[in-house]
Image (tube, rainbow, N blue to C red):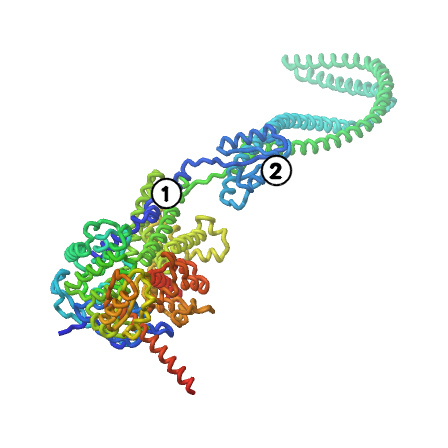
Amino acid sequence: MKFHSMIGKNLKLLFRSKETAFMIIFGPLLIILLVSAAYIGGSNNIAIGTYAPTYTSGVNKLISSFEKKDYVVSTFNSQEECVSKIRRGIIQACIIFPDDFKPDASESQKIIFKVDTSRMNFVYMLIQDIGSELNIQSTDISQDLTAKILVALSSSKKVVDEQYEAAKRMDSSRQLASEKLSSINSTINGVNFNITIPDLKTLKGHINGLDQISLEIKKTGLSGIEEGLDTLYTIQDSVLENDTEKLVDDAIGSLLNLTDVLEQDYLEVPKKIQEANSIIEDSAVAVSKVNDKLLEIKDNNALVEANLKEATIKLDSLKQDLTTLLGQLQYLENQYDGIRGLDAEGVSKPIITKIEPINNANSKLSFTFPYLMLLVIMFLGLMISSSLVVMDKTTKAAFRLFTTATRDEYFVAMSFITTMLILFIQTIVVLIIGGLFLQETLFNNFGVSITILLIAMAIFSFIGMIIGYLTKTQEASMISSLTIGTILLFISNLVLPLETMNKVVQGLTAYNPFVVLSEMLRQSMLFSMPLSGVYVKLGIMFLGIVILLLVVLIVQKSFKSSFFKGKPGDLDAKAFASVTDKDIKPLIIKNKEIKDVFGLLDSLDSLTRADFHELIKTKEKAVKINSIYDWVLKELGEKKLAKKLKTNSKERMILALEKYVKKKTKKLSKKM
Amino acid sequence: MVEEIFSIKSVSKNFGNNKVLDNVSFDVRKGEIIGIIGSSGAGKTTLLNMLVGFVKPSRGKILFSAYKRSTKDVNKHFKELKKTYNVTDKPLSLNKSYGFAAQTPSFYDSLTIKENLEFFGNMYGVGEKSIKTNIEILLKLMSLNPSKHVLGRNLSGGMKRRLDIACSMVHNPSVLILDEPTADLDPVLRNQIWEIVKRINIRGTTIILSSHHLTELDVLCDRIAIIKHGKLVDLDSPERLKLKYSKVQELMIESYPGEYKKFIPSLKGQNITEIFQEGTYLTIRTGEPEKVIKEVIKNLEKHGENLIDIKLNKPNLDDVFVEIYEQKRKQELSLEHKFAKEEVKK
């Protein structure tokens, strides 16, 4: 019963207070809705300014491309005007174009961005967005230029190919010429111009000797023929057989015939020798002429040989040049082959980056959702629990609440359970809304995710409760919660990457529950990290919960013990006197010196009406003289109190003084 | 036989160098209404807070005898003596035995009357059935039934005070402590509260209360404790206190044309303590009012004054209070005179 009643009371208090109800019910929903709306299908409508000395077609093209991207573009007549608009927050960035800006100009052109870096996140987005737009155009220009270069290269390649073939042909011609020259050279070298012309007289003598030789041949032949005839006659005489006789007769006849021929030929020899001699004489004349010609040729041949040698050297040199040319042409060929198949985009933008998510997230909201979820839990946890505690502390029911027969721990437990209950419901609602927006399930690793979320709820609830017990007003608790939440948020990945922060802050993040829990939640929701992957961190967080619980109990006890000290009536007169006992002119009431409110109250209590009316004089119901009012105003300087003492009723005066004393005492007790 | 609920034994309380309570000893009897009066800062609230353990005494002890009803019905009287606690030990069960209504009403503004009562009933550990019964009775008793579904913040001052007392009573305590329950209330509302206090007391609840409205306490309380500068000056029934401290009665006369100065000197010699004109009235304080009345009437006729009104104010607690608080001043003054005379003699 006590449990239900306490939870019910807490919920009623929270929901019947418009501010907290709004914060609890609509706060997280509003955050999620706004963030969802912001991340999904967002538009720009960001104002940017441009300045160009001349608004060329290139500038206008860029401006229209910005306008297409929902940027509100204003043009300015000077840089200063443009920059001053940034300072005044009218525009968010200023783009300064160079003079005569032409995107397709051959020389590079500088576009300057003027931004307000105090709006850091915005600036990054803007630079990325506008920069990417300019990059696209720059890339287009690059591609055009590259395409032109590639076309030129391609044409050059054709020429080189042709030249290569021609060079090859030249080389083979050169080779042929070289061979021919070589052949000519060897031929020429092979020619022996040293002709030894035989002595024609000796030849004539030899030919004349032929007559003798022919006589001898005639004599030898005739003697041989006679010997043969003798032999044959012998044979004819000795062997007379028919057949052999016939044969011998034939041989004798032939020999006799041969003798005739010899005789006849021998008769012809001198005639022939005569003719030969005459021919030899003619030949000698001709040979002499030839020899002269050859000598002339020999002389010319040396010149030819020298020229041939020079031609050979030249051809060798040509060969080397042709080899080099061919090598270079081959190299060019290879190079062309290397760039064959390249397109302009590939050349102008050789590296194409593509970021592929390793998770299934399909929108910005998906990957920020764990952080967002934890952000909601953190702020809600801190604010709800601190609010609940402060509510219990500062409510006028606090006195009764703390004097009931309920253990202190019970109050802690109930505040905690109430916060957890609200947070749990909110978490479910946020998850459902998140699921609707993201159109993907966030419940893949629900067990681990919900464990992490529950731990987060517990941690932030306890931190909120500590804040609640340490602060004295609802406003202070809210501000403290927001401050602590903001600090935790600031030293986390959500604002700036942790890696960009200094090492001290990075070290602190190890103790930042928001960082630890959001990382765990991210791993669980986006990468379906099993419990085994996060159990060490979970253990640490559990330890944190235990420590926080102990701290909560300690601060609660401390608060409780100080609570009754501050109750009205526990007047520390000394402390009170230290505030009121100034160097003041005393008020004299019935011969008694009054120096402070306390004494005044005491005296008024015991004052008779007659005595009282000596101090307060009225005429026709209007107060004419009020010594107490004058004294309080002038001597004590308590304007508010003096105003309340503007009465002719002793009771009202006592009442006002009592209230003042109580208020003052309460303040003092709290200070102590 | 007189049974004590509280036994306060030589209790002192210091805050720093300031002694708020100085050796206070008295008993609170079962079933009585005891009023504690004193000037602001006299230590009344401190004493009440000490009775229930909110403030620890610097010296002395407070014993509390817990009684409980034979049934949990608030209509039934207390019968059985349960246990005696030392209040300074702050036993949790002590909280069930008393109800405390502080100067500022203590309940939730955002809960209705009924919700407040249910909630505090649960906090005191009262069973569901008993809470229902008690709430019904308390709503009737406090005349809050028609407004039981009204939020605390929307109640009038008197209703808030009644709700606060009801919350103090929801667990049916044997003692109800009311610290200035009628502060800031108009006379009509004050009467309502006193009426309720009486009704509660009739059912056997011991009531300890403090108030500045002494005349009302005069009618209501069985006994009154007077605290002055942390000391218990007296504790007795109102009648006995009046007898003890205020022997002077106040005679108020109104006549026309009201030129009282003409005959005031002729009243000299009468047993008159004080005489002064307050508005159209002549106020005379005397220990022998009958004798003074005769003399005054005689003088009025003599000086041509037509008697319009004559009142005799019998002494009340205010007078007792003034008397007690004036005593010290008188003592101081007489001492001053004594020292002055001695110095003159020297």
Kindly identify which residue carries mark 1. Answer: A30
Which numbered disc, 1 or 2, marks the residue that appears first in the sequence? 1
Q: Quadrant of the C terminus of chain A?
A: bottom left
Q: Please tell me if label 1 and label 2 are on a single chain.
A: yes
Corner quadrant of residue B229: bottom left
Q: Position of residue A661 (x, y in %)?
A: 36, 64
Q: Mark 2 lies on which chain?
A: A
**Is residue B23 positioned above or below A494 on the image?**
below
Q: In this view, does B26 lie to the left or right of A87?
A: left
Kind of residue at badge 2: Gln
- Pick out the residue farthest to the bottom: B346
* SS assignment at label 2: helix
Residue A539 placement: quadrant: bottom left
Residue sitting nearer the eye, B134 or B273 = B273
How many callouts does the rendering have? 2
| Frontmost residue, A549 versus B31 | B31
Q: In the image shown, does B149 or B1 lie closer to the viewer?
A: B1
Question: Dot 1: what SS?
Answer: helix
Type of amino acid under label 1? Leu
Q: Is residue A154 left or right of residue B129?
A: right
| Residue B138 position (above or below residue A435) | below
Left or right position of A317 against A526: right
Mark 1 to mark 2: distance in Å? 41 Å
Image quarter where the N terminus of chain A lies is bottom left
Q: Residue at x 49, y 56 (%)?
A: A503
Give residue A587's position: percent from left, percent from top: 42, 68
Residue A106 at x, y percent in the picture: 63, 32
Disc 2 marks which residue? Answer: A79
